[in-house]
Amino acid sequence: MTTPATPGRPGRITRVSGPLVQIDGAADTAMHDVVTLGPHRSPGEVVAIHGPALTVQAYEYTGGLRPGDTATPLGHPLAARLGPWLLGGLFDGLLRPLGDAPVWLTTGALGGGPANGSAWRFTPRMAVGDPAGPGSVLGTVSTRGPIEFRVLVPAQVSGTVERIAAAGEYGPDDTLATIGTAAVTMTAEWPVRRPRPCTARRDASEPLHTGQRVVDALFPIVKGGTAAVPGGFGTGKTLLLQQIAKWCDADVIVYVGCGERGNEMADVVGELSALDDPRTGGRLLDRTVVVANTSNMPMMAREASIYTGVTVAEFFRDMGYDAVVIADSTSRWAEALREFAARSGTPPAEEGYPADLASALAAFYERAGSAETLAGGTGSVTIIGAVSPPGGDLTEPVTANTERFVRCRWTLDRDLAYARHYPAVSWSASFCRDAGAVGSYRARLGDAGWARRRARALDVLAEADRIAALADLVGTAGLPAHERMTLLGGRLLRDGVLQQNALVANDAFCTPAKSAALLDAVLDVAERCHALVDAGVAPSAVESADFGRLVRAREELGPDDAEGVGPRHDAILAELNATTGASAP
């Protein structure tokens, strides 16, 4: 169902300065309305109104526009056209399909959708005479992937089903049902900067399982939560986000490449196309929507791309699905805001960013959440945004403001990355505000030790980091025995649990059961080492034991082989007792 709009009176272009276009004579136009420019009807957005004069920021290349060309206000803000063609598709920042020629090089009218003549099979779920309220499922549309596309009653429509189409092939704009006097199609249009409605927001506690141990075990994110991934160049932000996109247990992935390099986006699309979906056995791309607005595409479309992505996620949330938005990177989006502010004459604030940067970040992240849909179901939108601070400075405005609005921060450490420790998530500079809720959720599912295990691991890592700084001065041999065992425990945690190898099939993904087994085994071995030195065993004798079998368990055992960890744990304890001459505990 499309959003009705009344076009305004056409005006005349008086000046073109790069992407900024000035218009005279256009009437009945509001801020943020879309205007089509020139004979190619290139889209732009109203960014300033001075009496009869409008200032428009073009979404596309303005080559060929000239004074005297016609400009037509469309009477509505930027809206995304949503439908079954989204899954498995590649789109630009305005949600127009990207084919062989980039849209930003072939200017044209705003719009988007399937090719002419496209059709999908519709199967009705309602009958004539049935009551239909907002969000009710009228029927389903078959797509090439595993996700069932549900045709919903629009939010502003309710009544009795007067007519519904029989099962068959239909185009995107064919009327599938009539409710009262409203015609419903399989498509919808929605303003990208306006959140889609829901009945209520729910307290989120169910964790989103990412398959990355350092995240799931120490800094979990809930379904409907938010996370920021700050890190300097080369620390592995894109790699971590790609791993989450591949392995997380969400129903729909919306990957927004915002201002990233074109070769990186090509790699993302290629890998998603080639990767088998571990949940369905099909292609992962078939339940993924890729919004690509690379660094060489127009700045204004980059600014809109993250709102486009979250609108798509809300669309699938309303169908009752768990959707994840991965924005890589919000720093490039903020740079687009800064560039636009400079061109429009807005007074700059800190480091040249506009004064409303914090408000813009809040408006984006607050659209995440677990929600009760209009029809009474449940769905969620989880937002994970990468942040690329210049020079790795985590005090710069984008990073500092983002931290205020997210529930998790996975800070990537340059030293870990250069030491080839991936994911390079710093356990000292990261945080999770939902750990308590996740611990309660895990306890309800039978894993009552999750919170205790997490707290013990963080304590060991923090203490090991403190002692490591001292060891750099006096040497490991000069430390007390207890502190040497703490260093050993921290090293076992880092190498045997937190590190993962994305190139090894057994280690690229890890189930919660195997993650818990590895963490329990390492913590138990570390405690046994402390007990041995407390009993008088020389720390060098403990350190000489072969811990390799336990460290290699993450790569040698299958991703869900939690039971295989136990024998390795027992073997290490037996070797420790034999090496040190101690009796079993």
Image (spheres, helix red, strand yellow):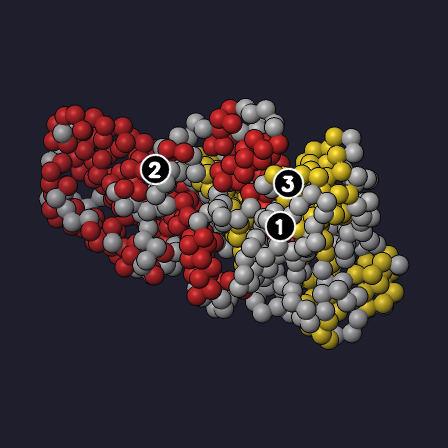
Question: Which residue is tagged 2?
Answer: 413
Asked whether residue 90 is in view, the answer is no
- Amino acid at the residue labelled 1: Gly
Q: Are marks 3 and 1 in contact (CB under 8 Å)?
A: no
Q: Position of residue 52 (x, y in %)?
A: 78, 34
Using the numbered discs, state the Cα–Cα distance from disc 1 to disc 2 in whole angstroms. Answer: 47 Å
Using the numbered discs, state the Cα–Cα distance from disc 3 to disc 2 in whole angstroms. Answer: 45 Å
Seen at 69% across and 48% down, the residue is 37
Mark closer to the observer (3, 2): 3
Seen at 42% across and 34% down, the residue is 389
Q: Is 570 displayed left or right of 64 in the figure?
A: left
Q: Which mark is residue 64?
A: 1
- Nearer-N-terminus badge (1/2): 1
- Amino acid at the residue labelled 2: Asp
Using the numbered discs, state the Cα–Cα distance from disc 3 to disc 1 in whole angstroms. Answer: 10 Å
- Nearer-N-terminus badge (3/2): 3
Question: Which residue is tagged 3?
Answer: 16
What secondary structure is found at the residue carrying circle 1? loop
Front-most of residues 265 and 327 = 265
Seen at 15% across and 41% down, the residue is 543
Front-most of residues 446 and 127 = 127
Seen at 46% across and 38% down, the residue is 387
Q: Are marks 1 and 2 in contact (CB under 8 Å)?
A: no
Q: Which mark is residue 204?
A: none
Badge 1, how many Cα within 10 Å: few under 14, some, many 20+? Answer: few
